[in-house]
Image (cartoon, rainbow, N blue to C red):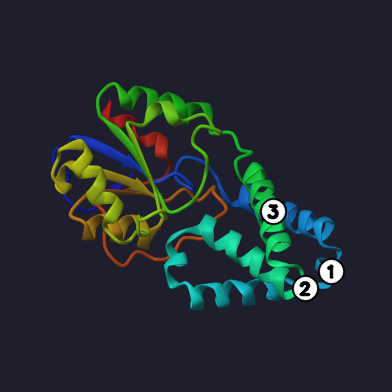
Amino acid sequence: MRFYRRLSSFKAISFDLDDTLYDNHPVISKAELELQQFLMSAAPECSALGSDYWWQHRQVCLTNQPELCHDVTALRLACIQSGMQALGYSSLDAANKAQQGLDFFLSHRNNLQVPQPVKELLAQLQQRFPLVAISNGNVGIDEIGISEYFEHCYFAGAGNLQKPENDMFSKACDDLAITPSELLHIGDCTHADIYGALSAGCQTIWVNNNEFGIRKKPLKVLPNAEFDFVEQLTIFL
């Protein structure tokens, strides 16, 4: 636990989800593998394809619809549909297979357990502060059992720009009727969470949990503090 800037009083706490509250890296890795197996069963032609095939279609989708960079769910759906159409499937068949693939992926993507100590922490913090979730991802907070702890949840896409853009930080502050400086944002990503929250005028704590699988980029701006794991937030209880 290290403090870099003076932490002023705050009235609410926002949380990133993936790789902040739980180790998301192995979950996503397994979900990606399961999706590839599903696509090969849905379209045998996929068995001969490498990952570069889908990456190329991802880039095509982003070129044609740049706004998809802010919506990981819509981007994945478009990528699968584009790849299926390139294999010769009709627009309707490609759309159906893409939706089935997305649903299958999300079922595995949401197959995770939030550690009980983290749930207990959220429950305790909830008694003192309004809590909100701000995520660039697409985890289902109902499916993973943490929706009850948050007053508001914001996900990139559907009109929300991804962090580090200030869209979701600003909406959270507006909905909570607080100023940005009164929001303490907790996250693992040095760019999306730390740079993004500071740029929006919020205070930040960087969760740098070395036991989690994701590789962290170096800090470009200093947060208010750096914690080794999210449970160290008990100091605010």
> Looking at the image, do the residues carrying marks 3 and 1 touch, with CB atoms under 8 Å apart?
no
* Residue wearing tag 1: 45
Mark nearest the camera among 3 and 2 is: 2
- Left or right: 223 with respect to 145? left
**Residue at 39% from the left image edge and 46% from the top image edge:** 16
Amino acid type at image mark 1: Glu
Amino acid type at image mark 2: Gly
Q: Position of residue 143 (x, y in %)?
A: 56, 33
Amino acid type at image mark 3: Gly
Q: Position of residue 107 (x, y in %)?
A: 65, 42
Q: Position of residue 17 (x, y in %)?
A: 44, 44
Q: Earlier in the sequence, mark 3 or mark 2?
A: 2
Mark nearest the camera among 1 and 2 is: 2
Give the alpha-carbon distance from disc 3 to disc 2, as whole Å. Answer: 17 Å
* Residue wearing tag 3: 101
> Looking at the image, do the residues carrying marks 1 and 2 touch, with CB atoms under 8 Å apart?
yes
Q: In the drawing, what numbered circle is on residue 88?
A: 2
Give the alpha-carbon distance from disc 3 to disc 1, as whole Å. Answer: 15 Å
Around disc 3, counting alpha carbons within 10 Å, would you say few (fewer than 14), some (14 to 19), or many (20 or more)? many
Around disc 1, counting alpha carbons within 10 Å, would you say few (fewer than 14), some (14 to 19), or many (20 or more)? few
Q: Quadrant of the N terminus?
A: top left
Quadrant position of residue 136: bottom left
- Left or right: 167 with respect to 67? left
Q: Is residue 40 above or below residue 22?
A: below
Q: Is residue 66 above or below residue 163?
A: below
- Mark 2 secondary-structure assignment: loop
